Image (tube, rainbow, N blue to C red):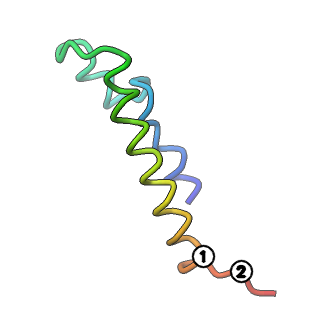
Amino acid sequence: MIALGASCSFITPLEPSCLLVYGPGRYRFMDFTKVGLILTVLIYIIAILIVPWLWPLQM
């Protein structure tokens, strides 16, 4: 889960794969922010629901 969280940098174009399309696609910083915010919230909700199911806390 830590690796998934570390690879979910959707809000800014600072991830290497985003930088590949940032210049040639003529995207603006706010384009990534608008779409990335939605994706980040979606991944957050999915992670909050799935992590306890995959790794339950037992004492």
Q: Which mark is residue 57?
A: 2
Separation of disc 2 and disc 1 at Cα? 7 Å
Q: Give the image location of residue 12, x and y in percent.
A: 44, 26
**Callout 1: SS:** helix
Labels 2 and 1: the sequence-earlier one: 1
Looking at this view, is 42 or 14 the one in front? 42
Q: Is residue 36 above or below residue 19?
A: below
Left or right, residue 58 beside residue 42: right
52 up-or-down from 4: above or below: below
Amino acid bearing label 2: Leu
Q: Secondary structure at mark 2?
A: loop
Quadrant of the snapshot with the C terminus = bottom right
Give whichever of 12, 18 is nearer the camera: 12
Residue at x 49% of width, y 59% of height:
45
Q: Write down the residue under mark 1.
A: 52
- Which residue lies at the image location 60% right of the left edge and 76% below the top edge? 52
| Residue for point 59% across, 54% down | 2
Residue kind at label 1, given as amino acid type: Pro
Q: Is residue 52 left or right of residue 7?
A: right
Total labels: the figure holds 2
Q: Name the spot of residue 19 as percent of width and height, x first.
A: 32, 22
Q: Residue at x 55, y 60 (%)?
A: 1
* Picture layout, residue 15 above or below residue 48: above
- Residue 46: horizontal and vertical position, in percent? 46, 63
As drawn, the residue found furthest toward the left would be 25
Q: Residues within 10 Å of mark 2 (few under 14, many from 20)?
A: few
Percent across and percent down for residue 50 are 50, 72
**Residues at badges 2 and 1 in contact (C-beta under 8 Å)?**
yes
